[in-house]
Image (cartoon, rainbow, N blue to C red):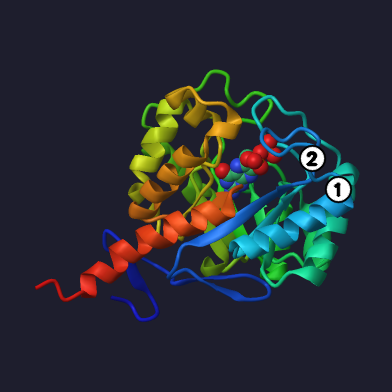
Amino acid sequence: MAEGRFAISRKTEVTPFWQTSRRRIDLSNPVLMGVLNITPDSFSDGGRYLGRESAVRRLDELQDEGADIIDIGGESTRPGSEPVSDEEELGRVLPVIEAAVERVDVAISVDTTKATVAQAALAAGAEIVNDISGLRFDSRLAGVAAESGAGLVLMHIRGRPRTMQQDIHYDDLLGEVVGELGESVQRATSAGCRNEQLVVDPGIGFGKTAEQNLALIDQLDRIVQLGYPVLVGPSRKSFIGKTLGLGVDERLEATLAACVVALLRGARVFRVHDVRAARRALDMADAITTRSSGAELS
Ligand code: HH2
């Protein structure tokens, strides 16, 4: 096994840490990214944290519940959503990022596809850029990540949020998602990003049918084989609603099931709304799989 790397899933070697511009995030335990959307229209928490006071309260809650990272977003990317201007997005996220840097110790991530928003967020103290476009929407974003040394999430998407659920077609779902994530990695490294800054994400719900989302989670080890840590974001999404016939507020247990299966297939980072529940489920699943191998069984 290469020095400094270890086997975390089905013998695939991935770096044991994620380098951001401010710290090294240890990936030997499941890493939780708590969601904080400062938007009027996000599919699950839209409108709840638009006021500064409620956003700040939520920052504290997410940290107390066990988040390692808080992902702050100012533009909904739900199917059918309309883009917002750079100014509008910045006006939503910057005050919350500034408050977060003052109040909490966890890493702050900005959920944006825009270079100008990312640059201002990083200057304000964010240390990760979560780009749902995998560097496809703004050609300047790769340079911002390279120059700052920020952590960078490269997510897979087909099309744009407004139209991504129309005309979904793959000849080879896993092969195409892996190939397109590989192109995103190539864009990042060509701009000067180092491998240890990068995390990849299959983009659950972004240009995929419910069945395709199930297959992506079940075959996540194919994505792990790219050689980068893998993030998944199944939290409360509509593939759960379609599979089990549940409304947005009834999807907690199914979200946890999806996260645990993803963990078993090699995911290391989990983007969720319900941090406390995910912390318990994932830490328990992780303890079962990692500690049992060293136990005296006789
Ligand atoms: N999903 C959403 C937003 N950002 N980022 C990554 N890396 N992976 C995801 O799966 C992902 C993401 C959508 O969820 P949410 O933020 O709750 O909703 P909205 O886009 O409506 O704000």
The location of residue 211, given as percent across then percent down, is 40, 27
Label 2 is placed on what type of residue? Thr
189 horizontally vs 90: left or right: left
Of 56 and 174, the residue lying toward us: 56
Whether residue 66 is situated above or below residue 218 in the rendered picture: below
Name the residue tied to disc 2: 39
- Kindly identify which residue carries mark 1: 92
Query: Is the CB atom of the residue marked by disc 1 within 8 angstroms of ligand 1's nearest atom?
Result: no
Secondary structure at numbered mark 1:
helix
Choose the circle earlier in sequence order: 1 or 2: 2
Measured as percent of width and height from the top left, residue 272 is found at 57, 49
Q: Residue furthest bottom?
A: 3
Task: Tell me residue 271's x, y (percent).
Answer: 57, 51
Q: In which quadrant of this rendering is ligand 1 seen?
A: top right
For the point 78% across and 33% down, which residue is it?
83
Which residue is rendered at x = 13% and y = 71% of the image? 297
Quarter that holds the C terminus: bottom left
State the CA–CA distance, disc 1 to disc 2.
7 Å
| In this rendering, position of residue 142 left or right of residue 208 | right
Placement of the N terminus among the 4 image quadrants: bottom left
Viewer-closest of 194 and 71: 71
Mark 1 residue crowding within 10 angstroms, few (<14) / some (14–19) / many (20+): many
